Image (cartoon, grey):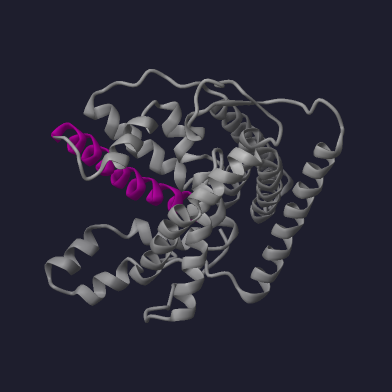
Amino acid sequence: MPQTSPHKEEGFSWSRSARTAGVGVAMGAADIVPGVSGGTVALILGIYQRLLAALSRFDKDLLVHLLNGRLGEAWRHVDAWFLGSLGVGVVLGAKGLAKLMVYLLQEQPTYTYAAFFGLILASGVLVARMSRPESPAATAKGIALGILAACFAVWLMSQGRITPSESLGYTFVCGAVAICAMILPGISGAYLLLILGKYETISDILHRAPNLTGGDFATLGVFIVGCLVGLLSFSRLLKWLLANYWSSTMAVLAGFMIGSLYRVWPFQVDTTPDVEEFKLKSFEPAWPEAIDGVALTCAAIAVACFVLVLVVDHFASRLGKDDTPADATA
């Protein structure tokens, strides 16, 4: 893994917080789109390692700081200014852009998916370049891992919904799995929750809040606990993998992103025409019927978005990405 220095940013800065919140807005908007992960945005915009490091520091040392009243130390320990700014941005992105994204996906799905196809493809290429294998053997290993990860992502994204269990244990597992997917580039947590059969249940509870029953509170509480356990434990695992197996891990992440293109192929057939709510519909990729104006426009949009990501990455590299973890050690 490339060497990084410990994070030294302890005070509050409006410019840094605004930049972090901006990344959060993009992450929140991305999580609305079926097949797109906020983790992809975090990785490309340069805050992924820092995010994993901050999440992994919700540990016994934090508890010691809190029990001894060292609130300032606890705040700095978890890089709270960063997490707070990012969290505000994610909420604003998910809420503020939800209607726009739903409109685009409902009214202009072909062109919208074409844009995301170009964005994710370029992102996958950049992540693959970040793996930086040190030898031909490492390169071959990375390619093999990337192909396997891409195949797994395609398989996962092509799965139909399963019949869910109503038990609280299953709800806990769904929360843990879905939140892990949301921070894993290339895997959509919302889509995975849909496959697991709990998307409608959780969405309905949130929609009816605060008029909830005791059973609703139990279901939502267990789901949230599952999310917290999954997020804190999985972030530590990913941090360790990046620290010890950087090249292989980046190759796998790139594979996940390339495989996720299956879900954002511009030309899709609606397999659930009787379902009115877009977020609950299912689609299957298909080839365009003809190379007409629509197909050419989709190609142009995808290429433009592909180039846009490369340009943004170029300037982000020159300005310096804010990807220094709060703790550079695994």
From which residue to which does the magenta span run? 214-243
Position of the C terminus, as image quadrant, is bottom left
Residue for point 69% across, 47% down:
115
In the depicted structure, whether residue 273 falls above or below residue 188: above
Magenta-colored stretch includes residue 216? yes
Asked whether residue 168 is in view, the answer is yes
Where residue 32 appears, x then y in whole percent?
50, 45
Where residue 219 appears, x then y in whole percent?
23, 34
Give the overall secondary structure of the magenta segment. Answer: helix
In the depicted structure, whether residue 192 falls above or below residue 63: above
Image quadrant where residue 190 sits? top left
Residue for point 65% across, 56% down:
130
Where residue 36 appears, x then y in whole percent?
56, 43
Magenta-colored stretch includes residue 206? no
Task: Please state which of residues 27 and 253 is positioned toward the viewer in this rendering.
Answer: 27
Asked whether residue 145 is in view, the answer is no
- The outermost residue toward the top is 163
Where residue 253 appears, x then y in whole percent?
58, 45
Position of the N terminus, as image quadrant, is bottom right
Q: Is residue 40 left or right of residue 194?
A: right
Residue for point 71% across, 51% down:
122
Q: Is residue 247 left or right of residue 193?
A: right
Q: How many marks?
A: 0
In the depicted structure, whether residue 49 falls above or below residue 133: below
Residue for point 36% across, 66% down:
84
